DNA sequence: GACAGCCTACGACACCTGTAGTAGATTCCT
DNA sequence: AGGAATCTACTACAGGTGTCGTAGGCTGTC
């Protein structure tokens, strides 16, 4: 897979990307509607600005469909997650993942099912 | 403990904070030296600016010692970690911690010792 | 006591991000 | 056809962050 790194995304831009990840390719107006549903009341042109900028950054692309451009994500949530997590890891734990996992397990809540899942995963790590 | 939230820290500011966490209270000049050691070549006044701004944000404080101000962190690495992790969780996983732990376990490396440690921790979660 | 060196206070500036208004082109409805 | 609704392209702008330079004050050393 190609490496594209270095793409910085602001919090609001990420919210737009999430809309695309979760509800697929759509027009500016539709993205705006989804954002509004999520309590993010931004103007139409604001959404347009975000999408335009993100297209320049290469994280979304657009195709003219009928009368309006339809935007779609060009990066997956996993790719973004990986980068963000990595960066957080580097900034706080010198890149070591274990402390973060410890932190999460100690500070966040998990359902029994999730715990079981984690336990299974750990078992597999026992190479 | 008081809640102080909402304090935003840039990447460079965080680097300064790390220096204070790792080598204790020190002067601007000393912080600058530590940053240089870590490959971050910033000017003296840049470091001063960071520390001044961070003092206004309340994350560091200073005391005049002899001839120069000595700065020290007023927030712990744990506090910052908690906020950052939380924010990342909200932005990518709707606040759910499990997916992130899964992600970490699947994508990052752990030593046998760390795995054992995690396993013990999970056992404790079994209420 | 005068100069060199370090210290802090301010002011600057560029770039990024969040937000939006306006204008011109296109489409749709009646 | 003509006005209304859309859409996209620009422009703008404030606040935050990364980076410094300059000026003025204090100190320490001959």
Image (cartoon, coloured by chain):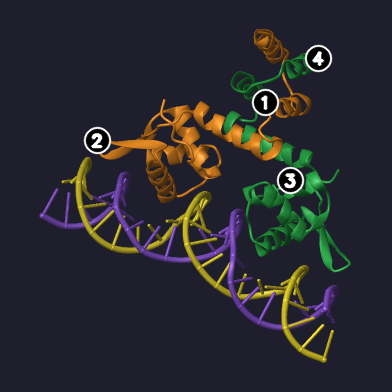
Chain colours: A green, B orange, C purple, D yellow
* Chain assignment, label 1: A
Do the residues marked 4 and 1 share a common chain? yes
Q: Residues within 10 Å of mark 4 (few under 14, many from 20)?
A: few
Of tags 4 and 1, which is closer to the observer? 4
Q: For mark 1, what is the residue?
A: A97
Do the residues marked 2 and 4 share a common chain? no
Q: For mark 4, what is the residue?
A: A120
Q: x, y (%) of residue A122? A: 77, 15
Q: Which mark is residue A18?
A: 3
Of tags 2 and 3, which is closer to the observer? 3
In the image, A127 versus B27, the foreground residue is A127
* Chain assignment, label 3: A
Task: Tell me the SS state at disc 3.
Answer: helix
* Residue furthest out toward the right: A66
In the image, A80 versus A65, the foreground residue is A65
User: Considering only order in the chain, which callout, 1 or 4, is on the residue closer to the N terminus?
Assistant: 1
């Amino acid at each position: 897979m190609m490496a594209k790194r270095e793409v910085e995304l602001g919090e609001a831009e990420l919210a737009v990307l999430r809309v695309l990840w979760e509800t697929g390719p759509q027009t500016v107006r539709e993205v705006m509607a989804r954002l509004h549903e999520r309590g993010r009341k931004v103007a139409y042109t604001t959404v347009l600005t975000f999408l335009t900028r993100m297209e320049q950054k290469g994280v979304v692309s657009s195709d003219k469909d009928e009368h309006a451009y339809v935007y779609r994500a060009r990066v997956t949530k996993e790719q973004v997650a990986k980068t963000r997590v990595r960066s957080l890891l580097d900034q706080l734990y010198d890149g070591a993942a274990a402390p973060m996992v410890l932190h999460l397990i100690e500070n966040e809540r998990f359902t029994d099912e999730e715990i079981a899942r984690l336990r299974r995963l750990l078992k597999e790590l026992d190479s």
